[in-house]
Image (spheres, rainbow, N blue to C red):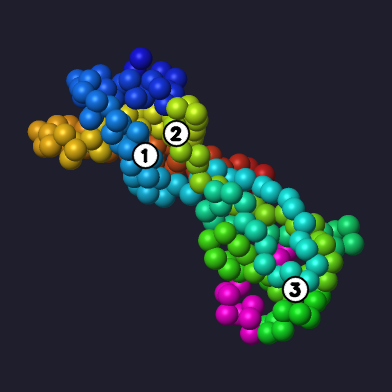
Amino acid sequence: MTAAAVQTYDSLVNDISTYLERTDTATLEKIPQFIMLAEQIIAADLKFLGNLNVVQSNMVANEDVLDKPARWRKTVSMNITVDGKRQPVLLRDYEYLREYWPDPTQTDTPLYYSDYDYTHWLVAPTPDTNYTFEVLYYQRVPPLSSANQTNWFTEYAPQAMLYGSLLQAMPFLKNDERVQLWQAMYQQAIEMLKLENVARIGDRQAIVRDAS
C-alpha cells in the first residue's frame, strides 16, 4: 500500500511500522500514540474544526441549560421552532444572558444562548415550553482506532497522516537524522491540502458571483 491508496487505521499502522523498520514491541505499542498526535497536529495546522453536523432536540420547560451533543467543538448557529416557524437564537456572552435574564425561574421564548461550559449551553429567557431546537455545529472527528478504521483524516489527508505519524515517532526513537525528511514530507502534504482548500473557497465565491 502507498499513501495515495485507500488508507485505514490498520494499513496506517502497518505503513508506519514498515517505514520505521521496527518490529519491537515497545515501538509497536507506541504507534497508536503517534497516530493520535498526528491527528491533533494536522487539525491545528489546517485550523480544521471538524465535521459540520446538524442536530435537533427539544428544550425542557423551566430549564435554561441544554446538553451539547457528543464531540461538540464549536457552535455555528441555533434556532427554535415557535408556532410552526423557525426563528434564530442569537449568540451572546454568558454575562449578557445573566444580566438580561437575572431570574431563571421566570420563563418566556428563548432569544439568546451562550456556552455554559464545554458540555452545555445556557439559554435566556428560560423556556416556557418544550421548544424544538436545531443546532448547526462542528463535531470533533472521531479518532482513529482498531474499532474506527477511517475518518476525515484518512479520507482527505492520508499522506499527512503517514508523514505526520512518522514525524511524531522521531523523538521516541531518538532518530534526529530523519526528522528533517519527515518534516519536509509532512509540510508538503499540508501545503497541498491548504491549496485545495483555497481552491474550494474560490469555487464557492465563483458560484455566488455567477448566481448574482
Q: Amino acid at mark 1?
A: Met
* Picture quadrant where residue 144 is located: top left
Q: Is residue 205 above or below residue 123?
A: above
Label 3 sits on a secondary structure element that is strand
Which residue is the extreme one toward the front? 25
The residue tagged 2 is 144
Residue 100 locus on image (x, y percent) = 68, 83
Tag 3: residue type?
Thr
Give the left or right position of residue 167, taking residue 58 as reference. Answer: left
Question: Residue 80, can we see it?
Answer: no
Q: Mark 3: few, some, or many residues within 10 Å (few <14, many ≥20)?
A: many
In front: 150, or 67? 67
Among numbered discs 1 and 2, the one appearing first in the sequence: 1
* Residue 19 on image: x %, y %: 23, 22
Marks 3 and 1: CB-CB under 8 Å?
no
CA gap between label 3 and label 2 equals: 39 Å
Mark number displayed over residue 3: none
Above or below — where is 212 with respect to 107?
Answer: above
In the image, farthest residue toward the right: 83
Callout 2: SS: loop
**What residue sits 23% from the left and 30% below the top?**
26
Residue at (44%, 24%) from the top-left corner? Answer: 8
Residue underneath mark 3: 126
Mark 2, Cα crowd under 10 Å, few <14 / some 14-19 / many 20+, is many
* Magenta range: 87-99
Q: Locate residue 32, reporting x and y percent.
A: 35, 33
